[in-house]
C-alpha cells in the first residue's frame, strides 16, 4: 500500500553485511567467495550483487530466468540462502540470516506501520536495553519457491503478522506490484471511496455506508487488494470514517477558519488536530493514515 523509501547508500551497506560474512564451516571463506565458486553458475551467472541488491525489476528478471527448478524442500539453493533457522531436514551451508537482516532493517529503514496494509503498528521498541521489533519480513517472491531470492533486499517487506502469515495469498505472485519497487504507485492510483447505502442519503451509523478501494483508469492492483483481503479488513475500520463524517458536520470550513484565527494556527494544522490528516510523505508513520487521507479528500479537507 505504501512505497518503502531507501537511503542512497543502503545497498552497499546491505551487500557488505552479507557478502563479507565468513563461513566457519568452510575454512572461513566469505559468503561472496563461496557463491562465486559454487553457486553462481546455477543462477545463470548473475553476480551476488545482482541477487542480493538488484532492484525489483532485476529480481523479476532473475526469477524468470532461473524459474522454479530449485523449489524442492532440500537443495543447494535452500542450503546456501538459508534465511530461517537451521533445519533438521537438511544441512545448511550457512548460519541463518533472519536475525541479522531484521537487525539491519531496524537500523536502516523507517519501520512504523505495515507497508502492505497500513493497519497495524510494526515499530521497534526497547526491552531490557535491547531493541526489539514488531515486524515480520515478508518475501514478495516466496522463499519456498524461489530460495535464491530469500536474502534479496528488495524482496523483503516489513509487514504485520496478519499480512505475512494469515492473509497474503501465495498463489497470487506480486510480479507487477511490490512496495519495494520504484514503480509502486498504489497510493496515487488507488483510493478509498465511501458509498452511501442509506435510502435517505444520510450517514448516521456504520450500516449507512461502505468503503472500498477503487483504482483510477486501471485494474493493476486488483490482485494486490485481493491477496491481502484489504476491502474486508478495512470494513472493520468504518468507525474511523464515521468519526470523520460527524466531525466534518460540526466543523465546516467557516468554523475551521475561526479556530485557526483563535489558536494562531494555520487551517492545515487545525485540520490535522481535528481529523488526524497527515501529509503523503508521513503516511507510513500512522495506522490508517491512507484511509484518513483519502476520506479527507472526499470531505474536501485537503
Image: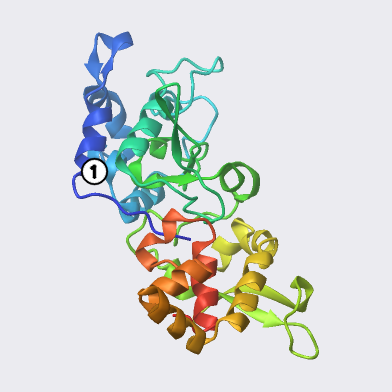
Nearer to us in this view, 102 or 91: 102
**Residue 289 as seen in the image, left or right of residue 165:** left
- Residue 239 in view in this figure: yes
Relative image position of residue 132 (x, y in whole percent):
45, 30
Q: Residue at x 38, y 60 (%)?
A: 282
The number of numbered discs placed on residues in the rendered structure image is: 1
The C terminus: image quadrant:
bottom left
- Residue 47 in view in this figure: no
Residue 227, quarter of picture:
bottom right
Q: Residue at x 25, y 8 (%)?
A: 27
In the rendered view, tell whether residue 214 sits above or below residue 91. below
In the rendered view, tell whether residue 174 sits above or below residue 17. below
Q: Which residue is mark 1?
A: 10
Q: Residue at x 32, y 60 (%)?
A: 182
Q: Could you say whether the residue bearing mark 1 is in a helix, strand or loop?
A: helix
Residue 117, quarter of picture:
bottom right
Nearer to us in this view, 158 or 280: 280
**Residue 145 as seen in the image, left or right of residue 154:** right
Q: Residue furthest right?
A: 199
Relative image position of residue 202 (x, y in whole percent):
74, 86
Residue 109, quarter of picture:
top left
Relative image position of residue 170 (x, y in whole percent):
59, 48
Q: Residue at x 43, y 56 (%)?
A: 284
Relative image position of residue 161 (x, y in whole percent):
58, 41
Amino acid at each position: 500500500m505504501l512505497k518503502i523509501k531507501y537511503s542512497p547508500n543502503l545497498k552497499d551497506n546491505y551487500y557488505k553485511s552479507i557478502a563479507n560474512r565468513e563461513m566457519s564451516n568452510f575454512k572461513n571463506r566469505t559468503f561472496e567467495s563461496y557463491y562465486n565458486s559454487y553457486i553462481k553458475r546455477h543462477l545463470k551467472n548473475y553476480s551476488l550483487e545482482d541477487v542480493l541488491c538488484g532492484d525489483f525489476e532485476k529480481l523479476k528478471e532473475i526469477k524468470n530466468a532461473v524459474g522454479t527448478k530449485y523449489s524442492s524442500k532440500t537443495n543447494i539453493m535452500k542450503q546456501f540462502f538459508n534465511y530461517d533457522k537451521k533445519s533438521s531436514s537438511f544441512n545448511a551451508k550457512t548460519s541463518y540470516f533472519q536475525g541479522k537482516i531484521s537487525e539491519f532493517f531496524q537500523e536502516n529503514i523507517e519501520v512504523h506501520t505495515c507497508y502492505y496494509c497500513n493497519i497495524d503498528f510494526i515499530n521497534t521498541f526497547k526491552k531490557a536495553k535491547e531493541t526489539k521489533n514488531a515486524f515480520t519480513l515478508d518475501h514478495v517472491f516466496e522463499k519456498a519457491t524461489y530460495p535464491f531470492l530469500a536474502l534479496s533486499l528488495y524482496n523483503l517487506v516489513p509487514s504485520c503478522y496478519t499480512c505475512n502469515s494469515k492473509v497474503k495469498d501465495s498463489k497470487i505472485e506480486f510480479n507487477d506490484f511490490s512496495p519495494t519497487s520504484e514503480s509502486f504507485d498504489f497510493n496515487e492510483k488507488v483510493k478509498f471511496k465511501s458509498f452511501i447505502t442509506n435510502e435517505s442519503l444520510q450517514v448516521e451509523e456504520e450500516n449507512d455506508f461502505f468503503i472500498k478501494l477503487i483504482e483510477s483508469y486501471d485494474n493493476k492492483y486488483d490482485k494486490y487488494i485481493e491477496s491481502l483481503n484489504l476491502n474486508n479488513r478495512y470494513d472493520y475500520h468504518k468507525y474511523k470514517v464515521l468519526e470523520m463524517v460527524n466531525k466534518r458536520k460540526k466543523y465546516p470550513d467557516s468554523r475551521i477558519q475561526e479556530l485557526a484565527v483563535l489558536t494562531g494556527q494555520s487551517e492545515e494544522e487545525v485540520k490535522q488536530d481535528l481529523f488526524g490528516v497527515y501529509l503523503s510523505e508521513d503516511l507510513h508513520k500512522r495506522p490508517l493514515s491512507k484511509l484518513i487521507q483519502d476520506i479527507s479528500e472526499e470531505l474536501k479537507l485537503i
